[in-house]
Image (cartoon, rainbow, N blue to C red):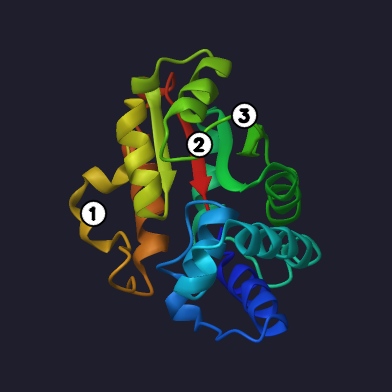
Amino acid sequence: VDSLADIGESMNEVLREKGLPEHSLGDYRALVGDGVTMLTRRALPQAWAADEALVAGCVARMRQVYGARPCLKTRAYPGVDRLLDGLQARGLALAVLSNKPHDLTVRVVAQVFPGRPFSPVFGERAGVPRKPDPTSAIEVAALLGLAPAEVLYVGDTPTDMRTARAAGQSPPSSSSRSSSIPTRSSSPPATARASMPLSSLTLTSDPRSRSKDTYTAER
């Protein structure tokens, strides 16, 4: 999902309350992807980011602000509904793994993809390492009764690509479209995130691949 606007505007509200400089939406492309604590630390001025008590307070406030509006502007990327239609038609299982707080991940998936059979849906959970640690990705595969290599992992950040590789799963960025994956030093072209998941539909179109599972991993 494209949740950048809701995340960025929520973080800016926290910064504004503290009298701190805000960031542009473009800036947030390089700040998101590694969970709310890391986002907050990156968004804060260096002096604040070095103070754990200040960071903790801002993280708590960010959870409140974002939790009140997680889907105000959040939408599926163009083409994703078509992708999901194709995957469901092929009988493939779908799951979600996110670095968003778990309760917000469940809410976002339910609102953006009503009726889609995603299971499991995991966000950031206490005691479980965040992506790019592969623990949760491997857990998802196990719950679906699949070996990691049977999973096609679809993501939209470098963190997702690192997670897929660490878990022994298949990231679509291994295709010729890998240059479209955003990095922390550049903004992605407008079509990058639509073209990447649509390319994965081609990868799973062979009926002999029916045993493979696809799950989406988002911010």
Question: Which of the two marks, 3 or 2, is nearer to us in this view?
Answer: 3
Query: Element at badge 1?
Result: helix
Q: Residue at x 61, y 68 (%)?
A: 7
Residue corresponding to mark 1 = 178
Q: Nearer the viewer, residue 68 or 15?
A: 15
Location of residue 202 (image quadrant): top left
Instruction: Sort mark 1 into few (<14), some (14-19) or many (20+) by Cα contacts within 10 Å.
Output: some
Task: Tell me if residue 189 comes above or below residue 119 in the rendering.
Answer: below
The answer to whether residue 169 shows anywhere in this view is no
Q: Earlier in the sequence, mark 1 or mark 2?
A: 1
Residue 107, given in percent of the width and then of the height, sits at 76, 50
Query: Element at badge 3?
Result: loop
Task: Tell me if residue 20 comes above or below residue 8 in the rendering.
Answer: below
Instruction: Sort mark 3 into few (<14), some (14-19) or many (20+) by Cα contacts within 10 Å.
Output: few
The disc at residue 215 is 2
Q: Earlier in the sequence, mark 3 or mark 2?
A: 3
The disc at residue 201 is none
Location of residue 171 (image quadrant): top left
Residue corresponding to mark 3 = 127
- Using the numbered discs, state the Cα–Cα distance from disc 3 to disc 2 in whole angstroms: 22 Å
Amino acid carrying label 1: it is: Ser
